[in-house]
């Protein structure tokens, strides 16, 4: 059974940082592309960033580029999202995702596996 379990969400003031973690089990982690999406209240789930299977390719949404960094630890089956210079508009539930493709699709319907989400709230 494939499981993705996020942690590390919480409440922070604007300008501060948070690091989200995602523990993945039930699949051969090194052969999956990974990424993060988020969903704010009343909005569609949107792409945040992704990393290829090999870790050599990363891409980010324009809204987070330069502030957020994705990383992976294949030895521990872990995915991370370092979020710096947080803004109130970053407030959302953040979801970890995994996909069999070489690089994760940015289309929600095409992603193979999802975590349950972790809430991030940024106050001004």
Image (tube, helix red, strand yellow):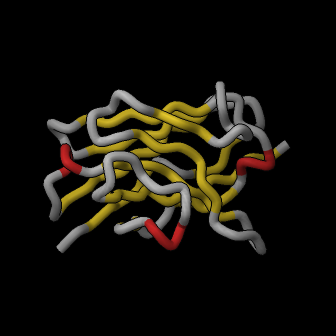
Question: Seen in the image, is 52 located left or right of residue 94?
Answer: left
- How many marks on residues? 0
Q: Position of residue 37 (x, y in %)?
A: 55, 56
Q: Position of residue 15 (x, y in %)?
A: 74, 30
**In the rendered image, which quarter is residue 53 located in?**
top left
Question: Seen in the image, is 113 located left or right of residue 10?
Answer: left
Foreground of the two, 55 or 16: 55
- Relative height, residue 93 to residue 57 (above, below): below
Q: Residue at x 60, y 54 (%)?
A: 47
Q: Residue at x 36, y 51 (%)?
A: 22
Question: Seen in the image, is 60 located left or right of residue 27?
Answer: right
Q: Residue at x 60, y 62 (%)?
A: 93
- Relative height, residue 77 to residue 109 (above, below): above
Task: Indicate the quadrant containing the C terminus: top left, top right, bottom left or bottom right.
Answer: top right
**In the rendered image, which quarter is residue 25 located in?**
bottom left
Task: Indicate the quadrant containing the N terminus: top left, top right, bottom left or bottom right.
Answer: bottom left
Foreground of the two, 124 or 90: 90
Q: Position of residue 20 (x, y in %)?
A: 47, 44
Q: Residue at x 50, y 60 (%)?
A: 95
- Relative height, residue 89 to residue 82 (above, below): below
Q: Position of residue 89 (x, y in %)?
A: 79, 49
């Amino acid at each position: 059974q494939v499981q993705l379990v996020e942690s590390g969400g919480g409440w922070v003031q604007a300008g501060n940082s948070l690091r989200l973690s995602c523990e993945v089990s039930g699949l051969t982690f090194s052969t999956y592309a990974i990424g993060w999406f988020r969903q704010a209240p009343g909005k569609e789930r949107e792409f945040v960033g992704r990393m290829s299977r090999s870790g050599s390719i990363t891409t980010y949404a324009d809204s987070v580029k330069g502030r957020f960094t994705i990383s992976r630890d294949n030895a521990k089956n872990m995915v991370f999202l370092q979020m710096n210079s947080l803004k109130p508009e970053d407030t959302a539930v953040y979801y970890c995702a995994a996909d069999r493709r070489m690089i994760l699709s940015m289309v929600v319907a095409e992603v193979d596996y999802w975590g349950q989400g972790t809430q991030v709230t940024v106050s001004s």
